[in-house]
Image (cartoon, rainbow, N blue to C red):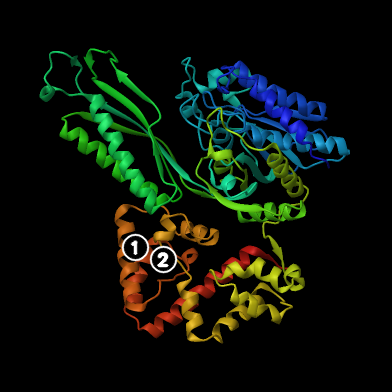
Amino acid sequence: MQISSERISQDIEVIAAMTETPGAGHSRPTFTAQWAAARDYVVEQAARAGCKHRIDAAGNVHIRQKAISWDSRAWLSGSHIDSVPNGGKFDGVAGIVVPLELLRAASDAGTTLPLELIIFAEEEGTTFNLGMLGSRAWCGTLVEEALCALRNRHGQDYLEAGAPYGVDASRIESDRINPDHYCGFIEVHAEQGPAMWEQSVPVAVVTAINGRRQYIVTIAGQANHAGSTPMSYRKDALAAAAGVMASMEACAKAMAEEQPGTVLTVGRMTVEPNAINVIPGKVSFSIDLRSSTDAMINQCDGVLRGIIAGICDERRLAHEITETESLPARPMHPAVIQAIRNGARRAGVDTMGQTTSGALHDAAILSFCVPAAMLFVASKDGISHNPAEFSRVEDIATAARIVCEVVQQPLAVKAIRLTQLNRADLQEFVGLVGGAWEHSPWIAERAWSRRPFSSVQHLHECMCDAVIVSDRQAKLELINAHPDLVGKLAQQGKLTPESTREQSAAGLMELAPAEVAAFARFNAEYREKFGFPFVICARENKKAAILAAFPVRLSHSAEQEVEAALHEIQKIAYLRLVDLIEED
């Protein structure tokens, strides 16, 4: 199959011209004529390539080759076509044109491709003040009543505005995603950050998507005459809001030092009565909070609430905080991540990066239903939601070649077969299973010579033997390779994907401030006594059990704890190997 960069470029330019604001960026609010024109262009292009389409009850467009039935298993790939006001031409659109080009290339080659292109309705959140509506409604995480409560600029709710474009309230519940119809989901997207461009990385697999919490804050003071009201008598809601924003910005900067990627944005504000000679009596503004760990989001939540309450109390003003959205940080599926890496290798892509996403995407919603991951293409200078947004068409074509390789293979939920391990040379073997032992590839190196392995259990035993015969220093280094639970690395989003999933499974990414403080206190006490981190198999325990284990193990001797830590590490490694390897 031949991928055409020229067709991809033409798609992007044609869709870019469908805007409410010609010459001033690209504006395609959901359920507008411009949005519909862009959607219809994609449908028409796919139809020319022999494809059929349907629109689900939530307003999302699905496209498959006519030879692929709707109830057969296929890969899902797509993104959104709506935009922020005066946005760029690549955001969302890159993820649409990739599967579109694959369907055309398959038609050119006369082959069938188990691929479904999806165009999600209302991803950005600027049309109805809440993002990912199409994917949420399709996945069932947003019910009909919630869609009725959302309004666009014309006062229409989602169901009313979407009715002419296929939204059908009567079918939303019955027309939900059927996970059995999908191998997995891959969303291609511009990075929307500077790192990949600066490091000359054209494409990167995304291993996790940051969580997001959004709020509407209302501060109520007293409108009064601007000329005759002394400063000491004023109840100025706008002045209070300004103080809140300045304080929150300072705190967010400090928290970003502790947890890189933590950001806080006030993006929308209304002032009443909004007159030049009247003291503002009421102000409402939005807050968008994001971070790579749920623990940091919870911490920031407490801080911003404290700031708002403190400033309003000092000024004798009333306030109200309404949480409008709360989405947790989402790890991407390891099998899809591995499939993308394998696809890149087969596509001859030499420079393949790995990253996390600070922006939220439909992939985060889909990940609750089907195995999902993302593939980023580099963004020049990290500029996005701006007419200056730019990604190289050749990078998008590279992403298309990778996705093409992926969708032609069945998804191996367990990414490695035992026969593959037994045939692997040393470098490949370590690359495949070295990560089962946290930052300690030497264990896989020593076990490699004992091939062939008859089972995962046999492989695990050989790896454990390599640890048992090692000297005390190597054992201590193995223990020290593990992160503190709810520690600095977790809060900075720098855990390995395996550790992230394990701590998340134990509920350690969703802790109250008091629980975070308890872990910090126990971690410090344990390190002070033994000189290495507290290690426990998080997947076999929940947060309450882990906290209860600290005092018990603190009563042990150092030798007892070395043995206890190694025993827990062996359990962690075994579960990781079981996740990875399919026995023949």
Name the residue at 82% across, 26% down.
48
Place of residue 531 in the rendered image (x, y in percent of width and height, measured from the top left): 37, 76
Residue type highlighted by circle 2:
Asp
Residue behind mark 2: 484
Place of residue 120 in the rendered image (x, y in percent of width and height, measured from the top left): 61, 32
Place of residue 326 in the rendered image (x, y in percent of width and height, measured from the top left): 43, 40
| Residue count near mark 2 (Cα–Cα under 10 Å), binned few <14, some 14–19, many ≥20 | many
Above or below, 541 against 122 in this view is: below
Q: Are marks 1 and 2 in contact (CB under 8 Å)?
A: yes
Callout 1 secondary element: helix
Above or below, 217 against 157 in this view is: below
Residue 64: numbered disc: none
Name the residue at 57% across, 17% down.
20
Q: Measure the C-alpha gap from mark 1 to mark 2.
A: 9 Å
Callout 2 secondary element: loop
Name the residue at 27% across, 30% down.
242
Horizontally, residue 233 falls left or right of residue 1, namely left
Looking at the rendering, which quadrant does residue 389 occupy?
A: top right
Residue behind mark 1: 519
- The answer to whether residue 517 shows anywhere in this view is yes
Looking at the rendering, which quadrant does residue 334 occupy?
A: bottom right
- The answer to whether residue 69 shows anywhere in this view is no
Above or below, 350 against 417 in this view is: above
Q: Nearer the viewer, mark 1 or mark 2?
A: 2
Q: Relative to the observer, which residue lies in front, 295 or 254?
A: 254
Residue type highlighted by circle 1:
Phe
Above or below, 229 against 178 in this view is: above
